[in-house]
Image (cartoon, rainbow, N blue to C red):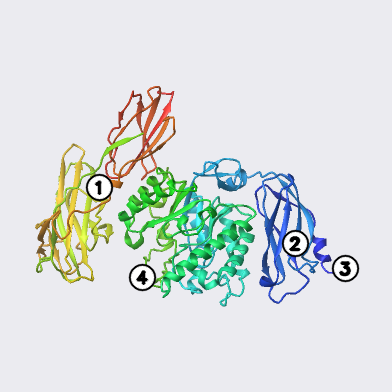
Amino acid sequence: MNGPGQANRERLKPCTAKANEMIELTFASTKTYADPFNDVDLDVSFTAPDGRTVRVPAFWAGEQTWKARYASSKIGRHRYRTECSDKTNRSLHSLASVIEVNPYTGDNPFYLHGPIGVAADKKHFEHADGKPFLWLADTWWMGLCQRLSWPDDFKTLTADRVEKGFNVVQIVAGLYPDMPAFDGRGANEAGFPWTTNYSRVNPNYFDAADRRIAWLVESGIAPCIVGAWGYHLPWLGVEPMKKHWRYLVARYGAYPVFWCVAGEGLMPYYLSHTKSEDAAFQKKGWTEVAAYLRGIDPFHHPISIHPTDMARRQLEDAGLLDFDMLQTGHSDRASIPNTINLVRASRAAAPPMPTINAEVCYEGILDTCFDDLQRFMVWSCLLSGTAGHTYGANGIWQVNRRDAAYGKSPHGGNWGNTSWDDAMRLPGSRQVGDWMTVDATGPTVQWGDWIWFPEGDPAKDAPVAKRYFHKTFEIPVGERIASATLWLSADDKFTAFVNGRKVGSNRDWQRPRSYNVAPHLQAGRNVLAVEAENVKAPVELNPAGLLCGLEIHFAGGDKMGVLSDATWRCARKETAGWTTPGFDDGNWSPAKAIGKYGDLPWGRLDAGDRYLMPYVAGTRERNALVIYLPAAQKATVHHLNPAEDYRAEFFNPVTGTVTLIGFVRQSSDWAAPACPDESHDWVLYLLATKDTK
């Protein structure tokens, strides 16, 4: 007669695996537990051929079944033995067998080179075999929900990101941001990750998540798994959150992953009435959870916490972190100073660790933060010393669908309705993946007058309303446009069109926006149209104004400007076709000039120009330099090595193409030629070479 557990023992036959690939072991209990998740813990100790032993937590897989997942780079025989918290259960406790790990023969970089850790210099990541790993992440916070359907939607987005060079995806394990607990938008095809009374996890939810996580890994993308959004901790509690993290380590620790303890760790729930108390509880609680995670993960994956500013500031002990995640803002160019300053602060802080700007200016959020800003953020961060960069597109992080936008946040706002598959095609997602001392002269802006609809004294007070502005101008036939840059500001917000095409929007009048409009211009008649809006403000007097400067350079050296002044036409109401060149604005009113640039109440505007400087990185020996020019500046490179010949190239971050400048030998300083196109940013490469042919 077979005793208890005999059937399980008969199934524990030797098995095989490949190096670094996950292998799953299944254990069925013949003893029935009323509450398996809370009544029983199962661990498996694996001993590698070199004698090193790791203790791997197993996870409850539903009913009376537990599973353990393991991976190792060590070739040879690995012995394992189970340990159950219920030592009387012979079907789970003290079971033993072996796994034969063979060499990996495929081309997946995670299996070829091993999992990713922090390099010895504490500045970058590398695989287990020493191969450097440059983090390029996309943001899929809600990517495990059913709104990104499996398999079609999920595989489509994955394939797009692989083709564009992404190798990390930041994804939340079900306890999502921007919604209350158990909001239907957060469910997947099996429901929610926890029961609604927080009594136990839902294994079926994580079975569905498994398919997605495994697909990312098989596609060459490392999941950065965020355990929960920070404000879930007061709801779930510290001890259940530890069980949540034990479950995640058991499910996904054998994969090449990064751990993110929480998202926006110190941010209380949006509608909380005890925000100060919640933030204090979260800081203490997440510190305890992070320490627990560090102790229970046998694979020692890099750990961070997604912050409200810097990961180091989210915990009571920054030493629990392996890398410093940043969040630096979503205010378009107004976020540039904070971004640069936080990157610099992180790189200078102790203890040293790699820095990743893990959230900044999602492309298209609130109809701002377009591809020019995406390029600035990735290049300025990388050349300021980060270990990579995280991109985000509004529409993907919350998974807007064409048939069902995500909808309102708890505070009532809406970040935008662009569907995930349209957001997937935003140009910044391709451009961020296409990849000494420098003097530079930045761009200057020739502004026109502040103008507005002729109603009272708009420089003092104006109605809360939209007004429509229209300006026609002629480009001589036969002139070839070399560049055309449009600068705009409106108190309070605007949307601009050139020849019927929308070129951009902005809602921060203190920081004007610039746009490359050369592709939209044509010989003959052109029109610049702007919808400007004065929004309600908590002030007695509410001024309004529009400010514009368009500068067009022709290939022959001539230039022309289109400035805001009293020759513009304007209207109270929108008229069909008003943004197109064929529109007749004869019935519209002349605009009212209400002040010069620099006049009060607006004063001088801050476009963040002092941060639009070149960013440079290179080797200590100065035999390789990479210089990012965010505004197509003219650059002078100092102190080149006189013993070296340098191959100089311009890299176009918009198209991904390279233009050879030539070969340079200088005893000291070298003045680079003008960028091929002044309408956007460029990257300058200098590489020492013996080949000058």
Position in image of residue 125 (x %, y %): 53, 45
Which residue matches tag 4?
413
Determine the residue positioned at 23% across, 68% down. 535
Residues under labels 1 and 4: Cα distance? 35 Å
| Label 4 vs 2, first from the N-terminus | 2
Of 565 and 287, nearer the camera is: 287
Q: Is residue 366 left or right of residue 604?
A: right
Position in image of residue 325 (x %, y %): 46, 54
Which residue matches tag 2?
83
What kind of residue is marked 1?
Ala
Tag 1 secondary structure: helix
* Front of the two marks 2 and 3: 2
**Outermost residue, right direction?**
1
Q: Is residue 152 above or below residue 643?
A: below
What kind of residue is marked 3?
Asn
Tag 4 secondary structure: loop
